Amino acid sequence: MIHEIRAVYDYETIRVYQAYSDPIANAALAAGTFVSPFSMTRMTWIKPSFLWMMYRAGWGQKDESQKRMLAVDIQRTGFEWALRNSSPSHGPSLDKSKPVRVQWDPERTIELEKLPYRSIQIGLSGDAVRHYVDDWIVSIEDVSELAEQVRMTRDVAFVPRERPYPLNPELAAIVGVTPA
C-alpha cells in the first residue's frame, strides 16, 4: 500500500486541515491561532488532505463539534519537526515518549470513496501542541463555504490542488512514506 503525504504547500508553509465547533473556530480566526476554548491538553489531529478531512468530518455535516472547516498554514520547519518527533499511533513500534502520532488512512475521492493509497493524519500532544499553536501557525482560513461548494457540486475543480510533499529519506523512513 502506498503511503504518501499530499498537500498544498510552498517554500515556507504547508496547509493542514482541522474541523471544529463554532466557538473554537471563531476564537481561532479572531486570534490568528488557537486560543480558549481550544484545549492545549488534548491531542489535536492535523490532516494535509482536504478530501480526507471532508470524509472525517462528513463535509461539516457530521456533528456540531466538526461543522467548521479550517485551513491552517503552518511553517514547513514545524511540520517536519512534528514528523521527526513522531511515532506510529498504534502497534509494536508505538513510542509513548514521542509527542506526535502518525496514522495512515485510505485517501478519498470526491465521493469520499476509498482510494488505493493512504494519507497521513498527524496527532499533536504536549510540546507539539504548544509549538503548533505558539510557533508554527502562519495563518488560519475558514474553508467551510468551500467544503459546502465541493459537497454540493462534486466539482473537482474546486478541490485544493495537492501534490506529493517532498521529504528527505530520513523523515520518509520515520513516518513510513513509501514510493509511488
Image (cartoon, rainbow, N blue to C red):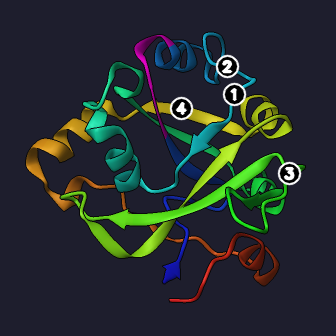
Above or below for 135 versus 159: above
Q: Quadrant of residue 51?
A: bottom left
Percent coordinates x, y for residue 45 in the rendering: 59, 42
* Cα–Cα span, label 3 and label 4: 26 Å
Residue at (73, 37) in percent of width and height: 132
Q: Secondary structure at mark 4?
A: strand
Residue at (80, 31) in percent of width and height: 130
Q: Which residue is mark 3?
A: 98
Q: Which residue is mark 1?
A: 42
On the picture, is 96 further left or further right than 161? right
Q: Please name which of the two marks, 4 or 1, marks the residue nearer to the observer.
A: 1
* Cα–Cα span, label 1 and label 3: 15 Å
Tell me whether the residue at label 1 lies in contact with that at label 2, contact meaning CB atoms closer than 8 angstroms: yes
Q: Which residue is mark 4?
A: 140
| The one of 3 and 49 positioned closer to us in this rendering | 3
Q: Which residue is mark 2?
A: 39
Q: Which residues are magenta?
A: 18-23
> Which residue is the extreme one toward the bottom?
180
Report the amino acid beneath label 3.
Answer: Lys
Report the amino acid beneath label 2.
Answer: Ser
